[in-house]
């Protein structure tokens, strides 16, 4: 991590370094005492002449270290006093023993006694390398002085000490490595902990935001579901449709909870007024347009008693344009609906229809025919005068008429992930037209499910089949 330590990090490191030095000093004291005991044991094996000066030099470090530790513990001295007392007293003891030793056999033992001091400084004591350098300099001075005051001849003394110097320097390097890496590790951990805290806070914020979004989404979904109840109320009752149009089927699949597609029905005397409508968009925007379209049809057919499809589309177009404030001075809008409105007369076996940008398919004599209507949608301002015309279809006993929106033909799927397309859709209708109407519905649903597979539904889908 390249993050620079903060002032708080550095202050925390000072506290941590002091804690580590405190612990290492305590363990250093234990090692020092063990070293003294080991030195006494070695001296016993060598049958040392336990003169008073030797006893004093062996034992004096212990009380000095203990006293300095107690002074620190009771707040009478800084921590460095007992810390320094460990290597200093050890080195001083070795130097005095070497100077006063009268037996050459003990020289090597005394010289080797310096090594635990440097090992203690490098492996146990956790402090900066400058303190190790102080100990090293003291060791050099103490041993030089010891050689000068040595009782026995010291012609080889310098050579005896020389091999300890590389060990001491290596221990100093190790001390530096331990301290700097300990500091780096501590600061990196602090930065990581700070990042983790930040991530935890971010996660908490995200969780709260997610919960809030879930609450809002539920509220929106509940509202949309309620809107579906309203939209469902404008759809004709299927039982009534079956009674009035016994040879008909209705395939209706909204893409979302609410739909931009809808079908509308009203009986006027012996004539059945049936519309299949595809509003701009789908979901909530399409549902709003569907309410506008359904209310407009109800007002024109039910309230004003109109039965002429072309006249109804013309007036509905004017109402929608006026309601959406579409005029020549505004930016061109694309809000509107495509639809087919039929006046079905079962007695005459005729269907009179007017179309706003939707075709009517007729299966007649084994041939699928496509009747095109007006190329203008309802409400969409194109800057041209709209003309909606009536067209009459006479149906034979086996003829079937299909009214559809573009959702089925535009659905993606199949092995290539392509659209179903109108050509394939017309072929599908031709293939099922000879079947009873309820079986036609079943076959269309099977084909749609097989084609769509795991692909998301692209648009609202409505297909109505009528046989007279």
Image (tube, rainbow, N blue to C red):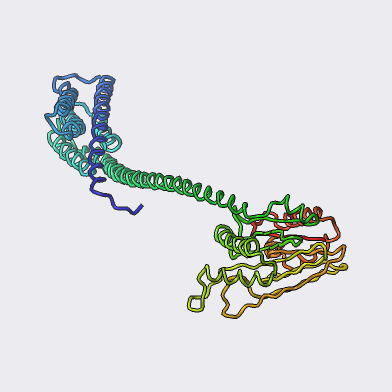
Q: Position of residue 190 (x, y in %)?
A: 32, 44
Q: Position of residue 10 (x, y in %)?
A: 24, 46
Is 212 above or below relative to 368? above
Residue 266 visible in the displayed image: yes
Is 62 above or below relative to 123? above
Is 43 above or below relative to 230? above
Report the side of 415 relative to 278 (left or right).
right
Q: Position of residue 136 (x, y in %)?
A: 21, 40
Report the side of 201 relative to 117 (left or right).
right
Q: Nearer the viewer, residue 216 or 288?
A: 288
The number of callouts visible is 0
Q: Position of residue 314 (x, y in %)?
A: 63, 73
Which of the 4 image quarters holds residue 467?
A: bottom right
**For the view shown, which residue lies furthest in the bottom direction?**
384
Q: Nearer the viewer, residue 199 or 450?
A: 450
Is 307 above or below relative to 443? below
Q: Nearer the viewer, residue 56 or 229?
A: 229
Which of the 4 image quarters holds residue 87?
A: top left
Q: Which residue appears at 64% of the width and 68% of the height?
A: 338
């Amino acid at each position: 991590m390249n993050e620079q330590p903060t002032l708080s990090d550095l202050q925390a490191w000072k506290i941590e370094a002091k804690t580590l030095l405190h612990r290492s000093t305590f363990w250093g004291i234990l090692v020092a005492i063990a070293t003294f005991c080991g030195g006494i044991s070695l001296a016993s094996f060598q049958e040392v002449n336990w003169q008073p000066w030797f006893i004093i030099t062996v034992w004096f470090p212990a009380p000095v270290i203990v006293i300095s530790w107690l002074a620190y513990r009771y707040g009478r001295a800084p921590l460095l006093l007992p810390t320094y007392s460990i290597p200093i007293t050890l080195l001083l003891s070795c130097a005095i023993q070497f100077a006063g030793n009268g037996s050459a056999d003990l020289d090597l033992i005394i010289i080797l006694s310096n090594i635990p001091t440097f090992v203690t400084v490098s492996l146990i004591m956790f402090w900066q390398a400058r303190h190790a350098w102080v100990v090293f300099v003291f060791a050099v001075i103490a041993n030089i002085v010891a050689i000068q005051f040595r009782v026995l001849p010291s012609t080889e003394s310098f050579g005896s000490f020389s091999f300890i110097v590389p060990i001491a320097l290596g221990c100093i390097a190790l001390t530096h490595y331990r301290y700097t890496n300990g500091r780096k590790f501590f600061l990196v951990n602090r930065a990581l902990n700070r990042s983790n805290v930040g991530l935890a806070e971010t996660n908490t914020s995200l969780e709260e935001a997610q919960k809030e979004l879930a609450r809002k989404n539920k509220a929106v979904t509940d509202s949309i579901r309620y809107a579906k109840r309203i939209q469902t109320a404008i759809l004709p009752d299927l039982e009534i449709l079956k009674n009035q149009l016994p040879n008909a089927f209705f395939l209706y699949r909204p893409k979302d909870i609410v739909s931009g597609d809808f079908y509308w029905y009203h009986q006027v005397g012996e004539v059945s007024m049936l519309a299949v409508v595809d509003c701009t968009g789908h979901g909530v925007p399409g549902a709003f347009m569907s309410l506008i379209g359904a209310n407009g049809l109800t007002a024109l057919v039910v309230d004003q008693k109109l039965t002429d499809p072309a006249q109804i589309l013309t007036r509905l177009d004017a109402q929608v344009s006026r309601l959406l404030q579409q005029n020549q001075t505004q930016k061109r809008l694309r809000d509107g609906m495509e639809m087919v409105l039929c006046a079905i007369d079962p007695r005459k076996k005729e269907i009179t229809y007017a179309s706003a940008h939707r075709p009517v398919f007729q299966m007649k004599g084994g041939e699928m025919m496509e009747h095109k209507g007006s190329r203008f949608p309802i409400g969409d301002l194109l800057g041209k005068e709209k003309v909606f015309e009536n067209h009459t279809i006479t149906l034979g006993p086996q003829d079937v008429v299909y009214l559809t929106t573009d959702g089925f033909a535009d659905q993606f799927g199949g092995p290539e992930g392509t659209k179903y397309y109108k050509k394939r859709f017309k072929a599908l209708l031709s293939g099922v037209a000879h079947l009873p109407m309820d079986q036609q519905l079943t076959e269309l649903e099977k084909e749609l499910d097989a084609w769509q597979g795991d692909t998301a539904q692209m648009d609202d889908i409505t297909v109505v089949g009528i046989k007279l």
